[in-house]
Image (cartoon, helix red, strand yellow):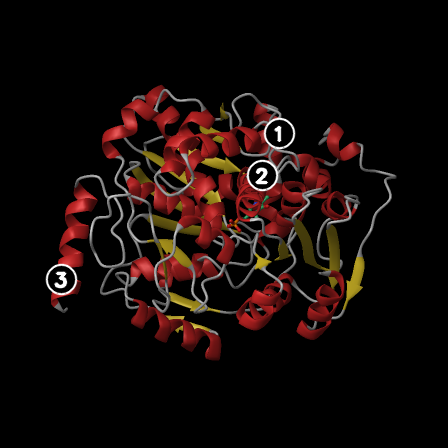
Amino acid sequence: MGLVGFHRAFLRSIFKRVHAFPLDHHGIVSKVLFMKYISTRGDIDPVGFKQAVMMGLARDGGLLLPEAIPDVTERLQEWASLSYTELAFEVMNLFTDLPENDLKAVIEKSYSTFRDDEITPLVEVGGVHILELFHGPTLAFKDLALQFLGNLFEYILEEEDQYMNIIGATSGDTGSAAIYGVRGMERIKIFVMHPDGLVSPVQKAQMTSVLDDNVFNLAVDGTFDDCQAILKELFNDLEFKDKHSLGSINSINWARILAQIVYYFYAGLQAMKKSGSETVRFSVPTGNFGDIFAGYIASRMGLPVSKLILATNENDILARFFNSGRYYMDSVNATISPSMDIQIASNFERYLYYWLGEDSAKLKVLMEKFAETGDIAVELGGKDSVDSLFTAGSGDAQATLATIKQFYTDYSYLLDPHTAVGVYVGLQDKGDDPLICLSTAHPAKFGGAIKDALGQDKAYHPVLAALSGLPMHCESLPNSVSAVREYVEQRVD
Ligand SMILES: *Cc1c(COP(=O)(O)O)cnc(C)c1O
């Protein structure tokens, strides 16, 4: 390490302990203490928050991360009595460069669309705390991040008098949440790819019934991973990206992770207060590793998390990684929790970067090897898991349906199949501290699974019932980068 590097690491270590304000890229404490963002691959100059939000994927192909993680341990007591939006402001203000009143306004607007006053209520059912994240416009947890991101985009674009074309890929829930996040906005066009025939009828209806003329739905003849690969390729084509001001709504966008950090604090502090426990566990149904990664950051910020329980369905690449250190690609299975039918988790690179001690060079070697062979491994160094903060497991269709049935029979509470996977895996963990299970969707979004579990479709939500019979609009495209590129090019200015 050179002198500058040492100086930087030294300052950083002090600041982590004191209050972890970011350093600028010369390692000097800026007078204006705004967080800067770096790439996991290490090949871009640090950028500010707004730039990071507009960039989506880092220009060197990596993912953006804050240069330092603030330590908020000293503030937890005070934070425990804040409302959701007050807490959101405190958390987000540490990472953003918006004037405080503007940030407050964006937050207020984003969560005013939720149907519950608490935004994310925490309810106790059968000895676990269910964190209901489905009270937003599209009834999935993705609204928490995408209502915020849509309003943030609009704010930045207006301030800079710019326009943006969003391209996204969805396994079902991201698409509708993103579309509801930006529908009708004048400075934004949104193109959303979904795997044709692999999203639920309700999910498809939610997306394609939005007829605003800034919204384009594309049914791609392939899997979600194919859609995500097309997306990555379009974003890595820097000429195309710049020419059309491409923006990203996938969970590679840091602002999404940021919005999700908030509810870990909200629920964690509430459960600790209620139970008198000094630590909490979270169980998170996981696909792209976005949601649970937000929990990982919350923990690094000082929220006392004893366990992050990673729950997957039959697509268990991540569970296998945490149990064995080996990360290898398999084919994607279609399951009854389709929003987790993912093999390559786009946020995993962010975690791996921290696991490797923030070493971009090492990370690059691993990611390049993974791109080539689809198979990498990390050394466990004699330990029996990759990270003692995590435990990981998976729940198959049978376990999912049995859990839905048990919770309905015993507690008259309906779990959606994704949440049921998290509850099932969470209950295998034998900790004593409160178990918070993230409930990622309203059960009515997945009526088929509810019917399979209970013999009857008991799930109902008026918002979804109102979709039937509405006109829909969607375009079918082959599984090809050039087809999608052409489609977009013909429709942007
Ligand atoms: C997206 C989604 C998940 C997975 O979240 P990740 O951030 O991709 O891990 C789980 N459940 C539901 C209902 C979802 O929509």
Check disc 2 and report its element: helix, strand or loop: helix
Q: Splitting the image into 4 quarters, where does residue 223 fall?
A: bottom right
Q: Is residue 386 above or below residue 463?
A: below
Q: Which mark is residue 147?
A: 2
Query: Residue 83 placed where, x, y %?
Result: 44, 22
Nearer to the camera, 25 or 253: 25
Q: Amino acid at mark 3?
A: Phe
Question: Which amino acid type is marked by label 1?
Answer: Thr
Q: CA distance from mark 3 to mark 2?
A: 41 Å
Side of 211 relative to 249 (left or right): right
What residue appears at the point 71 percent right and 42 percent down from the top-left corner? 184
Q: CA distance from mark 2 to mark 1?
A: 8 Å
Other-residue count near label 3 (Cα within 10 Å), few / some / many at <14 / 14–19 / ≥20: few
326 to 474, vertically: above or below:
below
- x, y (%) of residue 261? 42, 40
Q: Earlier in the sequence, mark 3 or mark 1?
A: 3
Pointer 3: what residue? 6
Element on which disc 1 rests: loop
Task: Give the amino acid type for the residue marked by disc 2 in the picture.
Answer: Gln
Residue 176 appears in the rendering: yes
Contact? badges 2 and 1 (CB < 8 Å): yes
Classify mark 1: residues with Cα within 10 Å, few (<14), some (14-19) or many (20+).
some
**Residue marked by disc 1:** 113
